[in-house]
Image (spheres, rainbow, N blue to C red):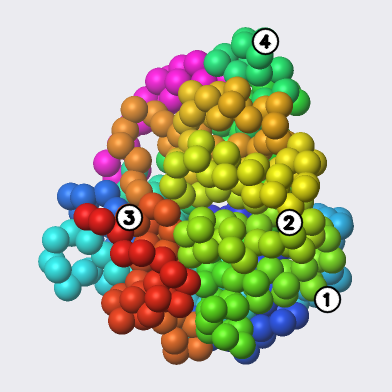
Amino acid sequence: MIINSLLDTDLYKFTMMQVVLHQFPSAQVEYRFKCRTPGVDLVSCIPEIEEEIAQLCTLRFREDELRWLRGLRFIKSDFVDFLDLFQMNRKWVRVTPSAKDNGEIEIVVEGPWLHTILFEIPLLAIVNEVYFRRTQPFPDLGEGRKRLHEKIALIRDDERLFDCKIADYGTRRRFSRGWQEVVLSTLKNRLGTQFAGTSNTWFAMTQNLIPLGTMAHEYLQACQSLGPRLRDSQTFAFERWAREYRGDLGIALSDVYGFDAFLRDYDMYFCKLFDGVRHDSGDPVAWGERMIAHYEKYRIDPKTKTLIFSDSLTIPRVIELYLRFADRARLAFGVGTNLTNDLGYTPLQIVIKMVRCNGQPVAKLSDTPAKNMCDDEAYLAYLRQVFGIPVPVA
């Protein structure tokens, strides 16, 4: 069984789920799966994926897990009471071969947002692990450890990086659950205080690590349908987040409508209200420079704010960004696939994205066009028009 705990997911799923329970409990959503890696045959994996999903839907939160969640300062008691009753429902997930007949598969999750929000991360972890145990039945764990130790040495042995900290954001694309456990225990033992924590709540609990995460793209996308007006959906999302957490979990996500549109909405009020901003698409250096300039425009010291980098990071990229911005802002780095799926095999670039909320299309228009995912071209054009986003040049 690949997933044996409902805590084996990312923290931001719980932080968003709490907002959904309190503010959008009747929202209906649809998510879709996409594999961006060409030439991958996942159709043969469907029976195993189906079996793992069925087992996933038997899980309930255990008492020790609920106690741990209750201990997080931003998790409210009534939300944990809800989780005590929670169970995933198999009827809300469909897995079928793609109509393209090219080895791709379709995974559709459709139902109440409150009851489907936790599917994304375990489904992606299941697809990854099923695929790799079929294609790499005897993985070279020694090579994986060698690569991991080399990455650790790059940070630990460079005196310039004494205050550089990295975190694990790699659950969704990990090679396997067992390998992620090895990676986290190694990082904890060899990096010490330079290892900031993990987005995975199960490993945060079992390895006594700091759980990390706030909001994801789906939250801002859903607000396109849930808010009063499309143009105000980004500010609506931030306002509702602040209403829920009252100054806690204050990291805003900057790339749902592109960085230009984000900066237009992220005025002095939000600059002061939120602790920092997360980067997840586009050029991170240009993003960091513009974010610092944006704070300075409002006479806010960037050194009091946190810039979080989390887009396809490698350790050399982390070091480059740290050396550029370390003395100009607080920094955090979330490293995903490069930590949890680097054993010498090509990792899968797979995602599950929300595509509809309450029957209406929703979309992300990030600064990396390949990350966009929407099946309604008319809506994408309208979204671009509303937010003043130019059509990318091919």
* Residue located 61% across and 84% down the image: 227
The amino acid type of the residue labelled 2 equals Cys
**Residue drawn at the location 29% of the way across and 69% of the way down:** 106
Q: Are marks 3 and 1 in contact (CB under 8 Å)?
A: no
- Crowding around mark 2 (Cα neighbors within 10 Å: few <14, some 14 to 19, many 20+) is some
Labels in figure, total: 4
Q: Give the spatial CA distance, label 3 vs label 1.
A: 39 Å
The residue under label 2 is 271
Percent x, y for residue 134? Answer: 29, 45
- The mark nearer the N terminus, 1 or 4, is 1
Say which residue label 1 marks: 78
Between disc 3 and disc 1, whose residue precedes? 1
> Is residue 18 at least partly visible in the picture?
no
Asked if labels 2 and 1 touch by Cβ distance under 8 angstroms, the answer is no
- SS type, badge 1: helix
- The residue where tag 4 is placed is 159
State the CA–CA distance, disc 2 to disc 4. Answer: 32 Å
Amino acid at dot 1 = Asp
